[in-house]
Image (cartoon, rainbow, N blue to C red):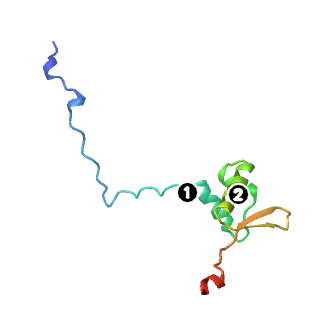
Amino acid sequence: MTDLNNSTDSANQPAPPARVMSAGDPPAPAPATSKSDSVAKLLRRAKGATIAEMQEATTWQPHSVRAFLSGLRKKGSVLSKEQRKSGETTYRLASKSAPAAAADA
């Protein structure tokens, strides 16, 4: 025969104590890099990046890459468009330099 009054119910049990990190525990993983950050990193390279390279890094379609580049321009980034010797078009983030006249005024 089962005694129903002495049965253990998990809802009535106290929660286990929270785990405290110790010095021997491995560090938490670094946050993942966003696709936007990946593209920006490619665009900062000296040789820039082609649409195909940006697609490969993000799995975006060509129209999505171009839309991202347009968004950068709208936000004030300066993009340069160049041709490699192979004929591929590359895009590169140009370094922003403050106008000298505005800095002296």
* Quadrant of residue 46 within the rendered picture: bottom right
Q: Quadrant of the N terminus?
A: top left
Residue placed under numbered mark 1 in the picture: 33
Residue type at tag 2: Ser
Residue at 47% x, 58% y is 30
Residue at 66% x, 74% y is 95
Mark 2: give few (<14), some (14-19) or many (20+) Cα within 10 Å: few
Residues at marks 1 and 2 touching, judged by CB atoms closer than 8 Å? no
Residue placed under numbered mark 2 in the picture: 70
Residue 74 appears at what percent x and percent y?
67, 60
Element assignment for label 1:
loop
- Of residues 5 and 78, the one drawn nearer to the viewer in this rendering: 78
* Quadrant of residue 101 within the rendered picture: bottom right
Residue 34 appears at what percent x and percent y?
57, 55
Residue type at tag 1: Thr
Residue at 62% x, 59% y is 38
Residue at 74% x, 64% y is 91
Residue 14 appears at what percent x and percent y?
21, 37
Residue 21 appears at what percent x and percent y?
31, 55
- Of residues 93 and 27, the one drawn nearer to the viewer in this rendering: 93
Inter-mark Cα distance, 1 to 2:
21 Å
